[in-house]
Image (cartoon, grey):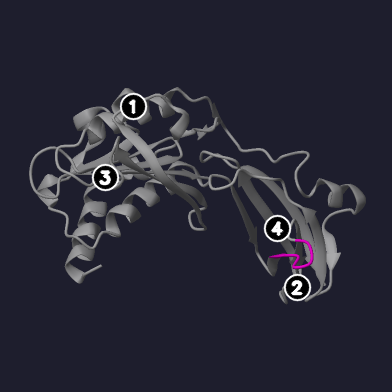
Amino acid sequence: MTRSSKRKSSIIRNRFLDDELRKLSRPLVGENLILEEMDLTSLRPYKLVHQEVFLRRTPLSIFRRLHFSEKEKRKARLQILLALCLDRIQGALDLLFSFVEDFERPIRLDSVVDVRKNYNLGDFGLAWAWLKGTPDIVTLVRNNVFLAVEGLETEMPIVEIARGIDGILNQLPTVDEYSEEKEGVFHEIQSKTPTPIKIPAGEVLAIGTIPKIKKDVGFTFFLTTSGSINRDITNPDKWYYRAGMDKGEHTITMLWGDAGILPKKAQLNIAIT
């Protein structure tokens, strides 16, 4: 990002991130959203050609980027980014402003509008056109979900696509906290050994077989405050944890799912000795 675009992005954050928005609190989305299974009128002219899923550690979020093309065409002309932030709405707002700040192309400040005030979308959001006319990009936050809809051609129905997705998000049930899977991947270890499980620094703890996920759309992510998670080279279906050198209590977290953005979660407490 150029120095000029960084400065303008900072101006955008300072302009819109006021005290009221900093204090905004919302519940967590409690049901998964699998966009490719939704029959949205505004998306009917398009077909999904590719998608990818990735993890962001800070704020902790599951991202799914979907690429669409007009039917009968191969080249993707529409991108939809969905991210569920496990750090609640304030984390999702940070994702939105970070998304705006990541553009190399300078954003015209006079083109940026508040989508809640102008289009009645989301709990908060921003939209802008690169030149003039209807928005080329619409971003919004609904509860703890961040959404960005980006058209790669002019005069695409970006606002209506965002409205359709936001309408679904607004109807999803919510929860106050995300619970762990009681029969998760660490259940067998926990049932045999009291936690925190003690393990010497540098030693190995067998985790076992992780749940099967759908090819191309499923995801599995491990997080640990010390050490690393590795695949067993003798049996690719099995995984193990190698303890780090930071002695004390630590947590291993596994996030996984077959589709959408709402992960299942399991945690294992360990003590490195």
Q: Callout 1 environment at 10 Å: few (<14), some (14 to 19), or many (20+)?
A: some
* Front tag of 2 and 3: 3
Residue 175 higher or lower than 188, as above or below = above
N-term-proximal mark, 3 vs 4 = 3
* Front tag of 1 and 2: 1
- Kindly identify the amino acid type of the residue bearing the numbered disc 2: Lys
- Between the C-alphas of marks 3 and 1, the distance is 18 Å
Q: Are marks 1 and 4 in contact (CB under 8 Å)?
A: no
- Between the C-alphas of marks 1 and 2, the distance is 49 Å
Task: Tell me if residue 233 is in the magenta stretch.
Answer: yes
Q: What number is the disc on residue 247? A: 2
* Of residues 129 and 178, the one drawn nearer to the viewer in this rendering: 129
Q: Dot 1 corresponds to which residue? A: 164
Q: Position of residue 155 (x, y in %)?
A: 14, 37
Q: Dot 3 corresponds to which residue? A: 77
* Of residues 73 and 63, the one drawn nearer to the viewer in this rendering: 73
Q: Dot 4 corresponds to which residue? A: 252
Q: Are marks 3 and 1 in contact (CB under 8 Å)?
A: no
- Between the C-alphas of marks 4 and 2, the distance is 14 Å
Residue 131 higher or lower than 104, as above or below = above
- Between the C-alphas of marks 1 and 4, the distance is 37 Å
Secondary element at image label 1 = helix
- Between the C-alphas of marks 2 and 3, the distance is 50 Å
- Kindly identify the amino acid type of the residue bearing the numbered disc 3: Arg
- Kindly identify the amino acid type of the residue bearing the numbered disc 4: Ile
Secondary element at image label 2 = loop
Tell me which segment is drawn in magenta: 230-235
* Front tag of 4 and 2: 4
Q: Callout 4 environment at 10 Å: few (<14), some (14 to 19), or many (20+)?
A: some
Q: Position of residue 267 (x, y in %)?
A: 71, 50
- Kindly identify the amino acid type of the residue bearing the numbered disc 1: Gly
Secondary element at image label 4 = strand
